């Protein structure tokens, strides 16, 4: 059994991560507040915490959230955590600098 703490995610993202992981892996989920527990659907299949973590990363990548969240694991429990972003980095990403090379008119 793998448990995930989704308290850092927005409310609509909490349900999306569950459906994404259930589509990719043979698991069934049980939600208790902000904790989601995943269990194998059958006794023959076994899904480990690193596999679930991989699909959580894929979920973040598909939603373009890799720069905002990261995933921490501790004793089989996974947690979404908001990343701290420097304001300077954020401003640079919002305002990309123009090309510094010569324009097509200059030779």
Image (cartoon, rainbow, N blue to C red):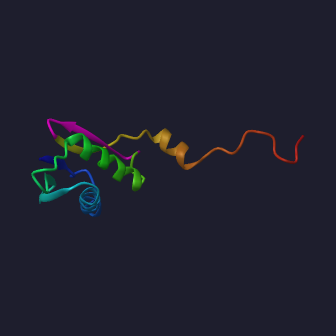
Q: Residue furthest front?
A: 44
Nearest to the observer: residue 15 or residue 55: 55
Asked where in the image residue 84 lies, by quadrant, the reply is top left
Residue 94 placement, left or right of 1: right
Residue ID at (30%, 49%): 55
Quadrant of the image containing the C terminus? top right
Question: Can you give x and y, in whole percent of width and height, for residue 10 in the image?
Answer: 28, 58
Q: Is 106 colored magenta in this rendering?
A: no
Q: Is residue 97 left or right of residue 101?
A: left
Residue drawn at x 34%, y 41% is 83
Q: Position of residue 85 (x, y in %)?
A: 40, 41
Q: Is residue 75 magenta?
A: yes
Q: Nearer the viewer, residue 81 or 26?
A: 26
Q: Is residue 66 left or right of residue 25?
A: right
Range of residues picked out in magenta:
67-76
> In percent of the image, x 28 and y 61: which residue is there?
16
Indicate left or right for 24 with 99 as reference: left
Residue 5's x, y, as percent?
Answer: 18, 49
Q: Residue furthest right?
A: 107
Most common SS among magenta residues: strand
């Amino acid at each position: 059994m793998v448990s995930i703490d989704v308290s850092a995610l927005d409310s609509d993202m909490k349900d999306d991560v569950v459906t994404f992981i259930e589509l990719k892996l043979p698991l069934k989920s049980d939600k208790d507040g902000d904790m989601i527990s995943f269990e194998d659907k059958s006794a023959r299949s076994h899904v480990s915490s690193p596999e679930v973590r991989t699909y959580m990363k894929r979920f973040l990548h598909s939603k373009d959230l890799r720069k905002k969240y990261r995933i921490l694991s501790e004793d089989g429990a996974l947690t979404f955590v908001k990343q701290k972003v420097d304001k300077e980095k954020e401003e640079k990403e919002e305002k990309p600098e123009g090309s510094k090379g010569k324009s097509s008119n200059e030779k």
